[in-house]
Amino acid sequence: MAILDAPQEITDKLGAVDLKDVQGDLVFDHVSFSYDEDVPVLEDVSFHCEPGKMLALVGPTGVGKTTLTQLISRFYEPDAGHILIDGKDIDGVTLESLRRNIAPVLQDTFLFNGSIAENIAYDRPDATPEEIREASRAANIDADIMQMPDGYDTQVGERGVRLSGGQKQRVAIARAILRSAPIIILDEATASVDVETEQQIQRAIAGIAGKRTIIAIAHRLSTIRNADRILVIENGRITESGTHSELVALGGSYARMNEIQTAAAKSGGIV
Ligand SMILES: Nc1ncnc2c1ncn2[C@@H]1O[C@H](COP(=O)(O)OP(=O)(O)OP(=O)(O)O)[C@@H](O)[C@H]1O
Ligand SMILES: [Mg+2]
């Protein structure tokens, strides 16, 4: 539906160049965007994420977090401002080279009928079994796979073993690692993951932290506690920016969200 709804087709600009040897430096420079002229979604968003750093986006539902990440892959284009990767405006790069350098990690990751190994090597059909296993270990999914009936040869998808949302997300992280895309976008679709799954995903993220630029949207603040920078987005604007401890000390929206989630965790509830 997202594709059908796209207002105009986005194609390579005349003279577009390939993004090469991407380090993963990402800049939003006064970016504004709306799907519908009358309803601004993002307004004057600016930030800089250095290569290998983790930037987290938090904020209420519907504020534009997913939209922001879709602008990075140019599924939509800003109405104003610029997005730069390694100092190059993505407006002037080929879509193919742009998207090759960005690995999405979604909880509703698509699994096709085939073995779990084939699914992990989806973007790298030439990967060796050792490479697949190494990526799976880093993504913290290896132990789950080894417990499946045929290990890495276990059939998954409609006609095979079904994976949980958290397992699918870790498969997506393994795929992203194998692809060695310098920019990873993690969009946690739901807050309704249990504590165990949450911790496993956290460990998977820790496995890639420092090596890739990670843009992470999280509903559970524990996921992004260690992010290098956290942006709070409210009403389409960045309202707070800093590390977890800086934002807690600031005593604003983030501190309030953190208090609510910490209290819920203590009383055994899941937020
Ligand atoms: N394809 C689309 N066409 C028109 N409006 C859209 C489209 N996708 C999202 N929107 C609207 O844009 C706004 C931002 O949506 P977005 O999905 O980016 O929010 P979000 O912060 O990711 O929310 P959540 O935390 O629930 O995932 C919402 O008002 C949403 O209804
Ligand atoms: Mg979203």
Image: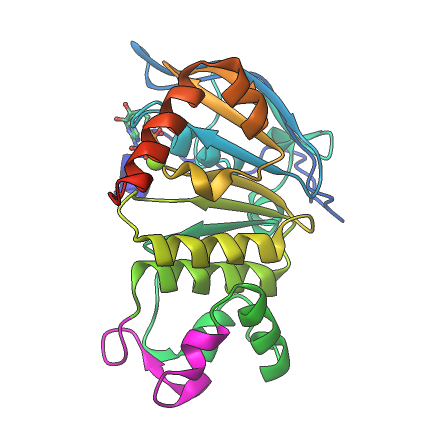
Residue 264 on image: x %, y %: 28, 36
Residue 218 on image: x %, y %: 41, 38
Where is ligand 1, by quadrant? top left
Residue 245 on image: x %, y %: 57, 27
Q: Residue 205 or 8: which is nearer the viewer? A: 205
- Determine whether, in the image, residue 21 is placed left or right of residue 135: right
Residue 84 on image: x %, y %: 65, 29
Q: Is residue 109 shown to the viewer in this render?
A: no
Q: Residue 189 or 73: which is nearer the viewer? A: 189
Q: Residue 257 or 259: which is nearer the viewer? A: 259
Residue that appears at 38% across and 44% down: 188
Residue that appears at 76% across and 49% down: 21
Task: Read off the magenta span.
Answer: 142-162
Residue that appears at 61% across and 22% down: 47
Q: Quadrant of the C terminus?
A: top left
Q: Is residue 220 magenta?
A: no
- Determine whether, in the image, residue 162 is placed left or right of residue 178: left
